[in-house]
Amino acid sequence: MSQEDTLVEAPESVRNDRFVEVNYDDAIPNNVDLSSDRQLLRALESWHPNYIDWWKDMGPDGFQNAEVYLRTAVGVDPAGWAKFGYVKMPDYRWGILLAPKVEGRTIPCGRHKGEPVWQEVPGEYRSLLRRLIVVQGDTEPASVEQQRYLGATAPSLYDMRNLFQVNVEEGRHLWAMVYLLVKYFGKDGREEAQALLERRSGQTDNPRILGAFNERTPDWLSFFMFTYFTDRDGKMQLAALAESGFDPLSRSCRFMLTEEAHHLFVGETGVGRTIEATCAAMNKAGITDPYDVERIRALGVVDLPLLQRKANFHMSVTRDLFGSEISSNAAESFSSGLKGRFNEAKLTGDDHELQDATYDVTRVVNGQLVVEPVPALRAINCRLLDDYIADCQGGIDRWNKTIEKAGINFKITQPHKGFHRKIGEFAGHHISPAGELLSAEAFAAQQGGWLPNDSDMDFINSLMKAHHAPGEYASWIAPPRMGINQQPVDYEYVKID
Ligand SMILES: [Fe+2]
Ligand SMILES: [Fe+2]
């Protein structure tokens, strides 16, 4: 029996509390004692069929009946929180799981620093808190929508399975935020939960809230770049919300971070395996010049300069997700104790209130890039962005190791923070990847060398062909070193019906 049957189609006569409780718990793994909160149960019951409709409408296109080898979160014990098995995605058991309560936890930052964390919504911050949860929640279904057509051109069943794993977990992250909304925000929360199913990525009249989540993810290279760079924004935001003084949000986000690690792995290894295939093909053909693009593309692999341009695009649109570097909203989220900095509780060297501290922000003043000390409270977003940029570097270094080992003279780099930005200090300016301020004309003239151009996209599209037989991998991506959950790399990760 699917979740939907249990929840929606149980006849009225047998829908006594006990029946619903037991079956509901069966269908939705949870550690929040769902069965004892009847109001919450009812709210989730009425949301659930709409969620399933959304999933069938906007989730992975064409594979809803496929049996996918997925992990499902069944607990929060780090040693064994998930189980693996074949499941049809609409029957996936989207659970509600919070990380364990930390006894004696106190608010780590802001004007309430040191007070016990809140177990209920602090009245004076209600709308600010609701907004934080809604914005986070909105990104989760958005990425599923962005990625919905990728199954058809999967470079292998292993990669297809990873895509679907990321998708169902983003669905679970939506559940995690919806749980908070319906449990703690009454009628407004229920309305917000419904609206999360109604906005659509890229739609003009009712788009997703944040810009990068309205961009298309049209091909697998975009998917890997997205999971490396944009899911990492997710990691940073979740980490900052895990520091929240509102404990249920903190506990939700702490558990979501466990899943996020796999999404980042998919991105890092996806790009890494692409680089591996390129380097191997170049070596085999005796090509040493990474800019010998025509010959490299003729080998059916992605040239490294194109990978750099793709990376530039995804880095720049993701950096915009951090919002304006200088922001009074971010200051208020911090001072109220609703959202901390990255690793807030572990940070040493300041008082966690930041009344008198400053933070260096790069800005454009009189046609020059200058670094200015700004009150640290107002520069919270800038700091999280800087932490994000530092966090991006590890995987990039590992990609560069692969290139170096192959004896090819090329390095993937991060563009200047101000490159191709639409939000914040650099919006409206034209800054090259190297960090020079340019005129609009000069930027436009060189843009094709910095961001994917039409011929790049045509070439990528030409590579996007289905590889749906077990053990088959597209020419442009190396097989992984290991399979999922100790399975071989030629395992039938998706049984396509
Ligand atoms: Fe997520
Ligand atoms: Fe994610």
Image (cartoon, rainbow, N blue to C red):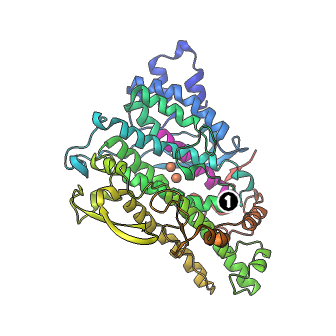
Camera sees residue 129? yes
How many badges with numbers are in the image? 1
Q: Nearer the viewer, residue 375 or 229?
A: 375
Q: Nearer the viewer, residue 299 or 78?
A: 299
Label 1 crowd bin: few (<14), some (14–19), many (20+), radius 10 Å: many
The answer to whether residue 215 is magenta is: no
Residue 469's x, y, as percent? 76, 58
Q: Nearer the viewer, residue 329 or 234?
A: 329
- When the figure is inspected, residue 427 is found, relative to residue 204, above or below; the finding is below
**Point 54% across, 47% down: residue:** 170
**Point 64% across, 62% down: residue:** 488
> Where are the magenta residues, as a range?
157-176
Look at the numbered disc 1 and say if its residue's Cβ is closer than 8 Å to ligand 2: no
Q: What amino acid is found at the position of numbered circle 1 in the picture?
A: Trp
- When the figure is inspected, residue 196 is found, relative to residue 146, above or below; the finding is above
Quadrant holding the N terminus: top right
Q: Secondary structure at mark 1?
A: helix
Q: Nearer the viewer, residue 385 or 256?
A: 385
SS assignment for the magenta stretch, majority: helix
Residue 202's x, y, as percent? 63, 46
Left of 190 or right of it: where is 251? Answer: left
**Point 49% across, 39% down: residue:** 175
Residue 282, quarter of picture? bottom right
- Residue farthest to the top, as pictured: 13
Quadrant holding the C terminus: top right
- When the figure is inspected, residue 163 is found, relative to residue 126, above or below; the finding is below
Residue ID for mark 1: 220
The answer to whether residue 158 is magenta is: yes
Left of 52 or right of it: where is 371? Answer: left
Camera sees residue 70? no
Residue 292's x, y, as percent? 73, 82
- Residue farthest to the front, as pictured: 366
